[in-house]
Amino acid sequence: LSANLLSVRRLQKSKAEVTFGPTSCRAKLGKKVLWSLEEETSCIKDLWQLPIIPWNGKTPTAATAAAAKATAGRDATAPTDGVLEAVKKVQQQQTHGEVLAGVDASAAWAKASSRSGEADWETWHERLCHVNFPMLQKLVKNGSLKGLEVKGEVKEIGSCPTCLETKFSKFPFNSTTGPAKTPLALVHMDVVGPTRAPSLSGSRYFLTIVDDHTRAVWVYPLKSKGEVAAAVLKEWMPRAQRECGYKVKVIRSDNGGEFIGADFEGELKRKGIQHQLTVPYNPQQNGVAERFNRTLQEGARTLLGRAGLPDPFWVSALRQVALVKNRVLATVGDKEWIPYVKWYGSAPAVNMLRAFGCMVVFHVPKEKRGKLEASGRWGVHLGIAKDHKGWLLWDLTTQKLTVSRDVKFLESLYYKEWKQQQQKLPSTPLIVEADEVQQPSRQVEVAVSEEEMSGVTEEGEQLK
């Protein structure tokens, strides 16, 4: 195989030995190995010089398929059928794991990828929290994100039913002023809640913070509005100022009691921070925060709706949307940039992103299981863990949150579909031998009538 992209030439009309194996393949002409990456042997009569695109970490199957497709486009007489059949055979021999009993997840295992970030357009659309297609196409084209590898032809993703159902809105309101000149020169804040259902930890509100210059965003779940001052002054502000090297100058918020209270307002004055309040009943003056709140809630509804997860998981969905929001393009007027790049000065990596709400099988440490217990458990992916280098998961066995780095993802199988499959499984009756049935204890007190007592011995057994 040649890397020449300009021509397709028949090298020699002779037999070439082609060997296929479950994870590798090799082509050999005489004593010369043309490409090698081994078990059952096949032959092709006509060996052609095929154009090969750069590997870029692709599997041999993907690279061979791309070469065959490119050849077909240039020369209709090229023996692409044989190449494609070979590719098909390699694909059939490649396996990614065993299908677990009780769940028909063969299609999901085929798409599972716990290490590689390569996926098709639809999968990346869901990994990036259903980001719009023009933005996804720009990110792929300019290579702004590490690990964003898309396979397949470019096509429009305009028929995503989940997006159509969950992102419908009236119209957006636009900003009339440009962004601030430096980070933290102007910060927008707002509190949303109470939510219809409390989160798993009991939160009913969430605080949103948006930096006007970079459009970087933060989300803090709150159990009450009284926690706003601590979240802003003790947790967010010291960390943000340390990360970017700037000081907060202006905070813009509405007239909510959580923002005009003595503890919050007084601390801002002591730090020399200006507090801008909106005119009552004019939320458009804090439009940046209001617009982000809408985007955040739309994204959370989309993730929960697609996964089929109940409302108490809204905090995990919000955090995942905020994380992705910082890693995709932000548009202000006619300018676009990635908030993460503008805040940290480096490109973000997205190779750990997986579709929110998809099913996973994760490894259980031996310290947390018995010797006869399975080493893997089913769970639901809830995003990248906060302050851990791993994934946040919902353990379906213990019904608790857990963090793990050893995870097998089934991104085409969501909790909604998995639950439906479980409900369709036939229930097997438990058959117990007669001598294995545990007899009721004779020490249990039973209320009986005087007539019944006449036929009962002291040991409690009925006389025949």
Image (tube, rainbow, N blue to C red):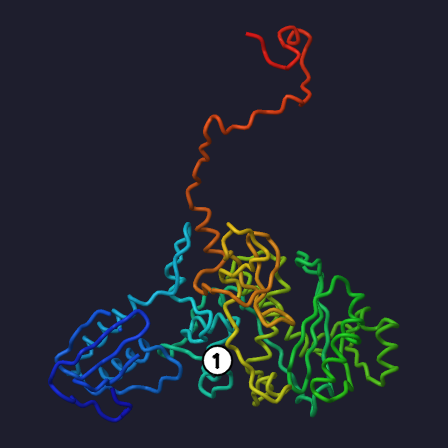
Task: Please state which of residues 389 and 292 is positioned toward the viewer in this rendering.
Answer: 389
- Callout count: 1
117 or 463: nearer the viewer: 463
In which quadrant of the rendered image does the C terminus lie? top right
Give coordinates of residue 453: x percent, y percent: 66, 9
Vertical order, 102 against 449 (above or below)? below
In percent of the image, x 57 and y 59: which residue is there? 394
Q: Residue furthest front?
A: 371
Residue type (three-letter) at the residue carrying disc 1: Gly
Q: In which quarter of the view is residue 242 placed?
A: bottom right
The residue indicated by pointer 1 is 147
Q: Nearer the viewer, residue 303 or 345?
A: 345
Taking 247 as reference, is 334 left or right? Answer: left
**Is residue 315 shown above or below 137?**
above
Residue shown at the point (27%, 76%) measured from the top left: 25
144 or 377, which is in the foreground?
Answer: 377
Q: Is residue 434 left or right of residue 31?
A: right
Q: Secondary structure at mark 1?
A: loop
- Give the left or right position of residue 40, taking residue 59 as reference: left
Up/down of 320 relative to 3, above or below = above
What residue is shown at x 85% (from left), y 71% (from top)? 261
Left or right? Give the position of 308 relative to 9: right
* Image: 181 above or below 307: below
Q: Quadrant of the N terminus?
A: bottom left
Q: Position of residue 28 (x, y in %)?
A: 20, 82
Q: Quadrant of residue 349?
A: bottom right
Determine crowd level at label 1: few under 14, some 14-19, many 20+ residues with C-alpha closer than 10 A: some
Question: In the rendering, at what x and y percent does residue 311 appear?
Answer: 61, 57
